[in-house]
Image (cartoon, rainbow, N blue to C red):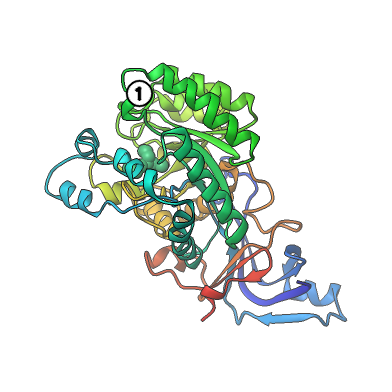
Amino acid sequence: MGTLLLDNIGQLVLPLADEGTTKSPLHIIHNAALLIDEGHVAWIGTRDEFKKEHPDFSAEEVDLHGQCIMPGFVDSHTHVVFAGERIDEMERRCRGESYEEIAAAGGGIAFSASQMTTISENDLVEQSIPRLDTLIQKGTTTCEIKSGYGLEPQAELKQLRAIKALQAQHPMDIKATVLAHIVPQPFKTKRADYIKIFSDDVLEQAARQELAHYCDIFIEEGAFSRDEARLIAKRAKALGLGLKLHVDQLTSGQGAELAAELGALSADHLERISPTGPAMLAKAGVIATMLPACKLFLGAGPWVNGRNLRDAGCEVAVATDCNPGSAMVSDLPLCATMAATLGGLSLAEALWGITRGGAKALGLNDRGTLNVGERADLVVLEHSDWRALLYRPANPPIARVMIQGRWMQNTLS
Ligand code: NIG
Ligand code: FE
C-alpha cells in the first residue's frame, strides 16, 4: 500500500475528538497536506509546514487543486441487510394508513421477517452488496448493520452470518449489531419465552461466534417494554456486547432515561424524547443519534430536535437508519442536511454528527477525526468550501472516497 501524499488541499476538515459544548466542533486547516502510510494518517498540517519538515519527500503525490478533505462518514445505525422491498407500504401511508396500522395488519417488520425465512444466505449477501456500494458513493466508509428481520433464532443467525460474510468481502468497514426488534407471532402470548430464547440462543451465539459487536433493542409499544429491555440488556452486557437502543420514536416511553440508566453507547431516534431526557443522556455520556430520514420517509410525527439535545449538553450523531420500511435512504450527507435545516444543528455540528459522532456512537476511537494514527478513511469534496456537502442535498459534490488508504473504484470519476 505504501505512502501517499495528498497535497494542495483547500480545507482539511478535522472534527474534534469530543463535541462537548463547543460552538464549532470542527478544526479546519487551510492550504493543507495529509500524508498516508500503510492505510493510516501519518502527518497533517499546512503545505508550508510539510515542505519544511520533509524537504526531500519523493513518494507518490496527488494534487487536490484546492478541493476539501474530510473524514469518511460513519453511519452508526442501518438495517441494510434485508430481504424484499416494501414499496406498497409507502403507497398505503400516502393514502392515509399509519406505520403502526400497517404493522398491526401484518405488514412492517413482520413482513420483512416473512421474507427472511425463505431467502438463502448467499442471496442475502448478493442483494446487500449494491446497497453498500451506494453508501460508499455517498461518502460512508464505516457502517453499522443490524439483524432484527429474522426474529426466530435460526433466521436471526442467518442474517448475522450474512453481515459477517459482507464484512469479509466488502470494502466497507462493517460493524454488526444483534437487534431485538419485535416478538414474532408464535410467541405473542409467551413473550417471556421469546426473551429467554433470544437471550439464550441468539445473543449467546452472536457473542460466541463473534457475529455481533453490539446489541440493540426496539423499545416501543408493539415491540419491547422497558422491563423486557432491561432483561435483554443485562444479558447482552454480560456477554460483552455494546448496547444501543431504539427509543422514543413513535411514542414517548422514557426511553432516553432507560438508555442513561443502562449506560448505552447511543440512544437512537428520540423524536418524542421527554423534557428531562436530553439532560439525562448528556449526564450519562450517551450519544444521542438523530435519524431524520424516518420523518422524511414516513411523513408522520415530529422532526427530532437536535438543537434541544445539543443545548442540554448531548453529543449528537446523525445516521440514515437505512431500512425497507421506515427509511429507504442511503445518503448520509442528506441526513446531515436535514439534521441542520429541520433539526436545528449548525452545519459544523451536522458534519460532526456523521463523522466523529457516528464513530463515538459505535465506541470507535480510530476514526472520525483524521488525526495522526487514525484510519485513512476520507472523502474528497469537489469544492473549495466543505459546507457544499450539505448545501447540495441528495447531490453532494463528492469527488472520491478512500477506505483505509485505498481509493474506492466506484467513486473515481
Ligand atoms: O429504526 N424502529 C424500528 N426499526 C426500524 C424500522 C424497521 C422497519 O420498519 O422495517 C427503524 O425505524
Ligand atoms: Fe432502526
Q: Quadrant of residue 206?
A: top right
Q: Residue furthest right?
A: 56
Left or right: 20 with respect to 256?
right
The yes-or-no answer for disc 1 within 8 Å of ligand 1 is no
Q: Amino acid at mark 1?
A: Phe
Left or right: 378 with respect to 42?
left
Taking the image in four quarters, ligand 2 sits in the one at top left
Give the camera-side residue of 54 and 149: 149
- Residue 1 position within the rendered picture, expressed as x and y whole percent measured from the top left: 75, 71
Residue occupying image coordinates x 49% and y 65%: 133
Dot 1 alpha-carbon crowd within 10 angstroms: few under 14, some 14 to 19, many 20 or more: few
Disc 1 is placed on an element classified as helix
Residue occupying image coordinates x 47% and y 33%: 153
Q: Quadrant of residue 55?
A: bottom right
Specify whether residue 23 is in view.
Answer: no
Left or right: 97 with respect to 69?
left
Q: Quadrant of residue 308?
A: top left
Give the camera-side residue of 34 and 75: 75
- Residue 284 position within the rendered picture, expressed as x and y whole percent measured from the top left: 57, 27
Give the camera-side residue of 210 and 247: 210
Residue occupying image coordinates x 42% and y 39%: 150
Residue occupying image coordinates x 19% and y 35%: 105
Q: Which residue is mark 1?
A: 187
Residue 152 vs 163, above or below: the answer is above
Specify whether residue 258 is in view.
Answer: yes
- Residue 299 position within the rendered picture, expressed as x and y whole percent measured from the top left: 23, 47
Looking at the image, how many numbered discs can be counted on the residues? Answer: 1
Residue 220 vs 318, above or below: the answer is above
